[in-house]
Amino acid sequence: MTGAHGAAERPLGRLSADDLLSGEFDTVILATADIQGRLVGKRLSPAAFVDKVLTGIHVCTCTLAWDMDQALDGITLDYAGIHTGWHDFVVRPDVSTLRVAGWAPRTAICLGDAVDDAGELIPIAPRTILRRQLEALRERGLAASASTELEFFIYRDTYEAARRGDYRELVPTTSRHADYSIQETEDLEYFFGPLRGALAASGLPVEMSQGEWGLGQWEMNLTHDEPLAMADAHVLFKLGVKTMGSRAGLATTFMARPTTDAGIGSSCHVHVSLRDEDGTAIYHDADDPQGISDRIRHSIGGVLERAPELMLWYAPTINSYRRTASEDFAGRGATWGFDNRTVTCRVVAGSPAAARLEYRVPGADVNPYLTLAAVLASVADGLDRAVDPGPATVGSSYDLDVEPLPATLEKATDRWESSAFVARAFGADVQVHYGELARHEWRRFNQEVTDWERRRYFEGI
């Protein structure tokens, strides 16, 4: 059976390199994720992209070294810097990701891997880090399926207006709490309807969208997939939402907690299930009274035990800890339970094929490649050591006496840098690279005088 351009039928939105020469496209974006999970790369003509399918494009290594503002001052890294001459790496296209960019006219987009001149994957690149954890699972005869549930805030302001106002007094897109509400969210369907359509046309099918509890807060879920494809979908989703929102005069933020009164903040709950080499789901056990296998218990044990060491990839910014500080629906130490939203690891048993763990600590500001890599490394570690997570929590976990997770970026970095597990699972080069970038972020924050300090001390002291 054939589809467009005479090619064998592919999933909706997916393209081949030959499709780009049909005359339907003017632009092809070739990009990879930077440390923060943002796409960096170039826009090419279709002919130029086809010419570079095998060789890729050159991008400066600063993109794997800079901070949130693309600043490099004060950052000392082995991989990139003045001492390396700010050399290039190559973004090598992963043609399996080539698709329509439904949010941009006559545009296609392809994601790629960061490789060196010899074609070897660059160890500190986010996509490489996730690839290596998937390979570690394959060596154990396992494969994973994952989804990342993203929440975010949208305001009735342009980004330019938000910048002029120093991001204060923004107008939320809902004026009442709209969690699950159909009536309160109808007003934004002029935006979300076309957005869902554009994402679907890009091969990014949206399972659902809904209003959330915070004023102006929303959630959209993409269909679960193999973890690398899921991380790719995650970064493309963010690009699509922010692009279409900006064109509609709306400002979207994936900050974990954009304002003090932003309720519980925005999460990125991570769902993971495993299957064996035969494709059989391994988290269900019909003979178990609770319907789950020892392997999901051991997976949970690994995730909970390693969480403090990996907090840097679950809460990567200063603002992340404004969300986790409340502990409401953001994880509660080493706790787990069945369909329980007060715990850190929630088990969703359901049908045999749908049995999965939901890790509730990550916020909307995560880099999905790193977060999924961290969860999968923890799962593998839990399976290897048969880690017992202890009894499931019944009812609220908020009154339990449990050791809290690191409460600041500094404390998370301390745990990261001192972790033998991090060095073993990801490599010493990755540990040092991401540790230094986190230290830089903490130093920059502590050099700033905040509004809170001025309000509290200007007159009163």
Image: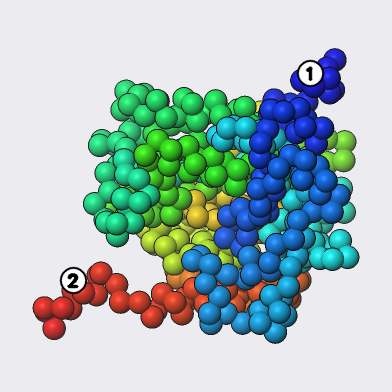
Horizontal side of residue 157 vs 68, given as left or right: left
Q: Amino acid at mark 1?
A: Gly
**Occupied quadrant, residue 153:** top left
Q: Earlier in the sequence, mark 1 or mark 2?
A: 1
**In this orientation, does residue 372 appear?**
no
Q: Nearer the viewer, residue 82 or 228?
A: 82
Residue 220, image x and y in percent? 50, 36
Q: Residue at x 30, y 36 (%)?
A: 174
**Occupied quadrant, residue 165:** bottom left
Residue 142, image x and y in percent? 82, 46
Q: Nearer the viewer, residue 124 or 144?
A: 124
At numbered mark 1, what does the secondary structure look like: helix, strand or loop? loop
At numbered mark 2, what does the secondary structure look like: helix, strand or loop? helix
Q: Amino acid at mark 2?
A: Arg
Q: Residue at x 81, y 65 (%)?
A: 116
Q: Nearer the viewer, residue 115 or 348?
A: 115
Mark carried by residue 3: 1
Q: Quadrant of the C terminus?
A: bottom left
Closer to the camera: disc 1 or disc 2?
1
Q: Residue at x 69, y 69 (%)?
A: 61
Residue 212, image x and y in percent? 38, 38
Q: Nearer the viewer, residue 377 or 9?
A: 9
Q: Which residue is mark 2?
A: 455
Horizontal side of residue 236 vs 193, given as left or right: right
Q: Residues within 10 Å of mark 1 (few under 14, many from 20)?
A: few
Q: Residue at x 18, y 71 (%)?
A: 455
Residue 89, image x and y in percent? 75, 65
**In this orientation, does residue 348 appear?**
yes
Q: Are marks 1 and 2 in contact (CB under 8 Å)?
A: no
Horizontal side of residue 237 vs 48, given as left or right: left
